[in-house]
Image (cartoon, rainbow, N blue to C red):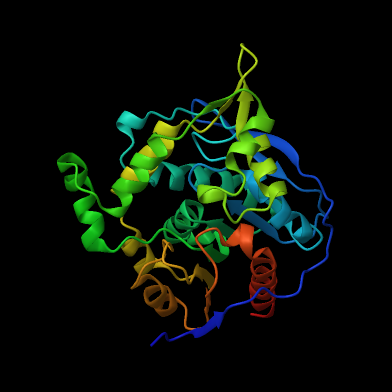
């Protein structure tokens, strides 16, 4: 039994209508041997800071329609992680072994954000972005006000330990299958309209609204000299992220002491595997653990109203504490 309140939800909640048309501005932060690119929404100075971290292979703009309605309540930033979107930092698949590089990059980002905002930051993220946010909270709790984790990647320890071995042996387990599929992704298209037509209603994009796919394309492509367009997150880098599992997310969960909300998918393709929800619930006795029964891994695209509702609820809990 979960020790925190557990909720099973099968339908979305009514929409939250707030600042839906707010457009974020593109900003950059010097870092290491390049720049971190991020989006920032118009805000009032006294609003609580919120950072959103995207999933593997995606980019900040993919979540614009999720986050824009919240810009009246939060001071929002959303990064393009290393190897994604408009960020320009080294991303070598051959030397990529863990997500610690993302943890350290996000610490750099959140240090600056917390300093400018005058206090710790509410961290939210999807998939790899949720796991990265979790690791930041474990490493630097002083920077983190609370956590909203959306289907984080929590691979059972036994499977995680075997990933590097089975990769060498060529066996088919979930992380390897995902990596192989990512590596085969088409990267170059004649134009963005052709890319949209190729993605619409297929594969990972099957449940995505067209406007979200359009934002994903806009935020994650660049023009080539021959007039074609290409993904800025190279398929080999996306694949390397699936294989780079030398970080210990379970040790990070044991160190957690921040208030949190977990939103995870009820469908079979959830990346938040047992005992993940139980362990997170144990880290915060007052946590909200929300399982959306009809959702796939792509909860932000399918149930954005639920995520906005829970972010507001978490903020209210933190404000009242």
Question: Is residue 247 something one can see in this rendering?
Answer: no
Question: Is residue 41 something one can see in this rendering?
Answer: yes
11 to 225, vertically: above or below: below
Residue 158 lies, in percent from the top left, at: 21, 62
Residue 115 lies, in percent from the top left, at: 64, 50
In depth, the one of 123 and 112 nearer the eye is 123
Who's the residue at 42% across and 75% down the image? 283
In depth, the one of 20 and 181 nearer the eye is 181
Who's the residue at 37% across and 47% down the image? 178
To which quarter of the image does residue 35 belong?
top right
Instruction: Pick the quarter of the image with the N terminus.
Output: bottom left
Tally of numbered discs: 0
Residue 318 lies, in percent from the top left, at: 64, 74
**Side of 71 where 187 appears, left or right:** left
Instruction: Pick the quarter of the image with the C terminus.
Output: bottom right
12 to 42, vertically: above or below: below
To which quarter of the image does residue 316 belong?
bottom right
Residue 68 lies, in percent from the top left, at: 76, 54
Who's the residue at 34% across and 72% down the image? 274
In depth, the one of 72 and 46 nearer the eye is 72
């Amino acid at each position: 039994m979960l020790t925190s309140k557990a909720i099973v939800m099968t339908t979305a909640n009514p929409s939250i209508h707030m600042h839906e048309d707010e457009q974020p501005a593109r900003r950059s932060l010097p870092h290491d041997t390049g720049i971190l690119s991020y989006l920032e929404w118009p805000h009032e100075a006294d609003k609580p800071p919120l950072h959103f971290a995207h999933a593997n292979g995606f980019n900040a703009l993919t979540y614009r329609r999720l986050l824009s309605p919240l810009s009246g309540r939060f001071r929002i930033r959303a990064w393009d992680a290393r190897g994604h979107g408009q960020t320009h930092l080294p991303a070598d698949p051959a030397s990529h072994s863990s997500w610690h590089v993302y943890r350290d990059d996000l610490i750099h980002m959140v240090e600056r954000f917390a300093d400018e905002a005058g206090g710790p930051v509410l961290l939210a993220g999807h998939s790899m972005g949720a796991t990265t946010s979790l690791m930041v909270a474990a490493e630097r709790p002083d920077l983190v006000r609370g956590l909203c984790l959306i289907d984080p990647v929590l691979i059972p320890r036994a499977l995680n330990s075997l990933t590097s071995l089975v990769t060498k042996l060529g066996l088919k387990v979930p992380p390897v299958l995902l990596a192989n599929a990512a590596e085969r992704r088409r990267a170059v298209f004649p134009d963005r309209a052709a890319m949209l037509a190729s993605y619409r209603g297929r594969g990972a994009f099957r449940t995505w609204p067209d406007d979200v796919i359009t934002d994903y394309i806009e935020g994650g492509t660049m023009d080539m000299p021959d007039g074609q367009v290409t993904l800025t997150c190279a398929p080999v880098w996306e694949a390397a992220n699936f294989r780079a599992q030398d970080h210990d997310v379970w040790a990070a969960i044991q160190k957690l002491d921040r208030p949190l909300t977990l939103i995870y998918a009820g469908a079979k393709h959830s990346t938040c595997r047992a005992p993940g929800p139980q362990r997170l619930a144990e880290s915060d006795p007052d946590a909200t653990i929300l399982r959306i029964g009809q959702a796939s891994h792509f909860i932000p695209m399918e149930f954005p109203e639920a995520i906005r509702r829970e972010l507001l609820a978490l903020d209210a809990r933190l404000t009242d504490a």
